[in-house]
Image (tube, grey):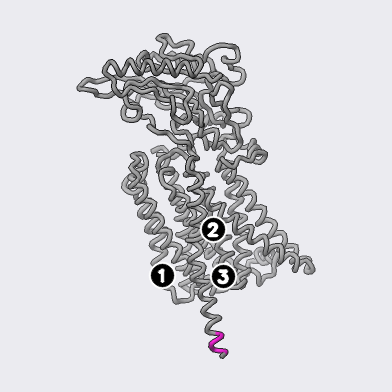
Amino acid sequence: MNIGGMEWGVTLWIDLWAAGMAGGAFLTAFLADKFSGGKLKNLFKLAVCTGIILALIGVALLLSHLGNILWFWHMFVTFRPESVLSLGGWILSGWLMVAGIMLVLWLASHYIRSLKPLADKATSILSWVGFVMSILLMSYTGVLISASTQPFWAVTPMLPAVFVVSAITSGVAWLIVVSLIVNWLNRTNIRPYHWVIEQFFDESGWQIESSAIAKLAKSLVIAIIIELIVIALFILWLSASGSPAATDGLALLTGGELSLWFWVGLIAAGLVAPLIMLGMNLKKDYSTGILAGITFSSAGLVVLGGLLIRALLLIAGQA
Amino acid sequence: MSKAILFDLTKCTACRACQVACKQWNEHKGEETSNWGSYENPRELSGETWIKMRFIEVEREGKLDWLFLRRSCLHCEEASCAIVCPVGAIFKTDEGFVHIDQDWCIGCGTCTQACPFNVPHIDHHAGLAMKCSACTSVGYNRLADGKKPACVTTCPTGALEYGDRDELVAKGRAVVDKLKANGHPKAYLYGENELGGLHVMYVLDDSPSAIYGLPDDPKVATSDVVGKWLSGLVTAGVLTALPFWLVFKRKQDLASQSGKKGGA
């Protein structure tokens, strides 16, 4: 199997992972904030700020994947809704624009206090736009792959569902990881960090409450269970498809060269182990002591699992 | 006027003059290859190889047959590559051939995943998607000069013909009828109706999929894209909101209910 020779290789795995996770983190924080009556604004800000970094990584990798990088602008003078990549380029750009405007409004209202009421209203409206764009962003990553003639990707409509569920699972896990990092940084004396935070935000704006992290961890447990069910349905659908090329890809994934990565890397380490580690501590405080370490490593494994599932699905489809 | 190329497998001797003529006309380099157990060479199409002959060994009625099939762009009427191209660099010429504009292609590779025949390839030197243009490339346009494509001109046995598509369909059907009458009941004119009608058609003496590895009912890559968008959107909108509602909203509701009871 010549992975290096595949047209859609490592840059695209990471692009789809980073873009999907940015959308997943936005959607997670938006719903968490809305369902908790607007009490998780800090978490939402963290999701938007780190999501912008992820999306920019996605854009950079998408551009580096192009054979002719200097002509990337051709995509932005053309709108072709029938082409999933064209739509995806516009969705990713739109998402970045919405998130970027929200970030600018938060910064502006930090420096010019009189702007705050207006900025709050505008960011509230933009958050709804960003929520819709996040759903489109997560879906596009899966639809792009499945709108092909490679049987492993195209024979079932389940692939976009797998990508979306994985994007949300990775998004929740990403938020847990960055929340724990930010809370740890707040307790340190790392001057450059505190200086940067003071320049842009109120220091308190970056503290993520331990109860919010605990709830995210509980959400992650449910999201992992849903992801395992969706992956099982995807496998069942593929094996029942009757397409020899699709079942060959499936055999490669579940019993061939990729099987160790699939069963041990993705299913065991990336999903089941975090599920058990988090599930055993559901009633406890996730944010301090050894449990913080367990929560951090569980969420970290899920984030890496999100990358692995994209790599494995892209390789199996092109092998 | 819609044009086409007809490949009559029964006349092909696999001399590969078409491969050489294509390389020569389009000024493509030879590729370094290695023996992989077949006379087929190179092993696959690439950015530098736009035509290659496939060699197929098959046992039929206790007899080993060595069959030859032209492998190149089939110039679909409903071309997946043109549909999925994000910048609209792939279009159809007046004759019906599918052409990649090398001055607009960004080398994203989407067309390479969308083609049901796995034809376009990225040329990693140029950074662009490449495939047969039926000799309509800028600066190399034989058709505009009233010539036939280079592969057709060079074919010594007449296995390749170029002309009006309707006439070639009639010709192909006649050969298929003859084959059927001479002990090839599964003879088939591939491309007459597939994907809205191909502009490169094959006269085959046997089943397209079982013997020649061609898809029986090729589909446009985006034929069920609406269902796939719905799969993603419904999953995102409904299924995944559940954990957040259960954990954040339900807890909030329970807390406010117990607060009211406590207050009362």
Q: Position of residue A176 (x, y in %)?
A: 52, 65
Q: Are marks 1 and 2 on the same chain?
A: yes
Residue denoted by label 3? A35
Q: CA distance from mark 1 to mark 2?
A: 21 Å
Subunit that carries the residue with mark 2: A
Asked whether B260 falls inside the magenta stretch, the response is: yes
Seen in the picture, residue A312 relative to A282 is either above or below; the reply is: above
Q: CA distance from mark 3 to mark 2?
A: 16 Å
Span of residues in magenta: B259-263
Disc number lying in front (1 or 2): 2
Subunit that carries the residue with mark 1: A
What amino acid type is highlighted by mark number 3?
Phe
Residue at the image position 34 percent from the left and 30 percent from the top:
B209
Residue denoted by label 2? A24
Seen in the picture, residue A94 relative to B194 is either above or below; the reply is: below
Q: Residues within 10 Å of mark 1 (few under 14, many from 20)?
A: some
Disc number lying in front (1 or 3): 3
**Most foreground residue, A11 or A143:** A143
Residue at the extreme top of the image, as rendered: B156
State which quadrant residue A247 falls in: top left
> Would residue A79 appear left or right of A275 to someone viewing this image?
right
> Would residue B26 appear left or right of B202 to someone viewing this image?
right
Quadrant (top left, top right, bottom left, bottom right) of the N terminus of chain A: top left
What amino acid type is highlighted by mark number 1?
Gly
Q: Position of residue A106 (x, y in %)?
A: 71, 63
Residue B89 visible somewhere in the drawing: yes
